[in-house]
Image (spheres, rainbow, N blue to C red):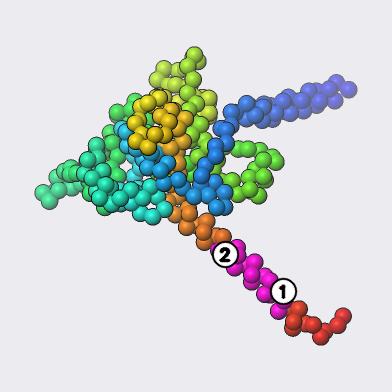
Amino acid sequence: MKRFSLVLAAAGLIGLSAAMPAAKAAEQLNPPRYGWSFAGMFGMYDRAQLQRGFQVYKEVCASCHSVSLLSFRNLSQPGGPEIPAAQVAQIAADWQHKVREIGDDGQPAERAPRASDRIPGPFANIKAAEAANGGKAPPDLTLMPKARSYERGFPWFIIDMFTLYQEHGADYVKAFLTGYEQGHETPPGTHYNKYFPGNFVGMPNMLQPDQVTYSDGTPQTVQQYAADVTAFLMWAAEPHMEQRKRIGFQVLLFLLVFAGLTYFTKKKVWKDVHA
């Protein structure tokens, strides 16, 4: 009997230890859904929002973060912000960071960017970025909405599969940018963010109301800034999303027509054959 009690106690401890991570995971605050224009099978990027998002990136985020996979010329191509080519060339010429390259004399040199260049980041290399940020380099943002996500759990992830909702990363990035809170004790050099795993993050709250001036009359709020720059980063991560969705829909239509033709062909060929 005593041995049986010990076995039950051990089983209870094992069950408790297994349940603790699940309970801790249940406490993780999931980002709220946002009504993205590019969500769903027929979703498309909002051109004005992409232009505002690039403005937020340029005036706020570019001081620390790079978008190293993006070229200036991409800003004028179809499917993106579609900024006029002449304006893109001017944006490149006035960019706050120079292109770093090896000069004709074999020595490191800098020059003003051109529209054909990748958008240069704020630091010459990762060591310089680490030295300027307390030993931790700010991450590149090109693929950030694709690299971050969160778990919805059962049965919600099944619902997302059927509704074709793929914007979990965008939800997380927007929530992160608006998730800073005051009044929490944090380790030195960190800040409290209710959506960041572990809650303590080195990046301070960078968005403030009326920080970036919009020329189209859009409200200049933190929520709007976060949504706009997230949409821009989503486009940077998947610039051909609209083309992908269009081709996918066309393929579905083709398969539907092909299935119908196959069915009626089978009926025609085998109409005189009886069981």
Q: As drawn, is 77 to the left or to the right of 274?
A: left
> Of label 2 and label 1, which has the lower sequence position?
2
Q: In the rendering, at what x and y percent does residue 220 appear?
A: 40, 29
Q: Main secondary structure of the magenta part?
A: helix
The magenta stretch spans which residues? 250-265
Label 1 crowd bin: few (<14), some (14–19), many (20+), radius 10 Å: few
Tell me if residue 53 can be seen.
yes
Q: As drawn, is 215 to the left or to the right of 267?
A: left
Q: Residue at x 51, y 31 (%)?
A: 175
Q: Is 262 colored magenta in this rendering?
A: yes
The three-letter code of the residue at mark 1 reads Tyr
Q: How many marks?
A: 2
Q: In the rendering, at what x and y percent does residue 63 appear?
A: 31, 32
Q: In the rendered view, tell whether residue 241 sits above or below residue 95.
A: below
Q: Quadrant of residue 151 in the image? A: top right
The three-letter code of the residue at mark 2 reads Val
Q: Residue at x 70, y 41 (%)?
A: 155
Tell me if residue 200 can be seen.
no
Query: Which residue corresponds to mark 2?
Result: 251
Q: As drawn, is 48 to the left or to the right of 26?
A: left
Q: Secondary structure at mark 1?
A: helix
Query: Which residue corresponds to mark 1?
Result: 263
Q: Residue at x 62, y 67 (%)?
A: 255
> From the image, which quarter does the N terminus lie in?
top right
Choose between 144 and 96: the one closer to the eye: 96
Label 2 crowd bin: few (<14), some (14–19), many (20+), radius 10 Å: few
Q: Is 269 colored magenta in this rendering?
A: no
Q: In the rendered view, tell whether residue 160 sits above or below residue 28.
A: below
Q: In the rendered view, tell whether residue 86 sits above or below residue 148.
A: below
Residue, far front: 217
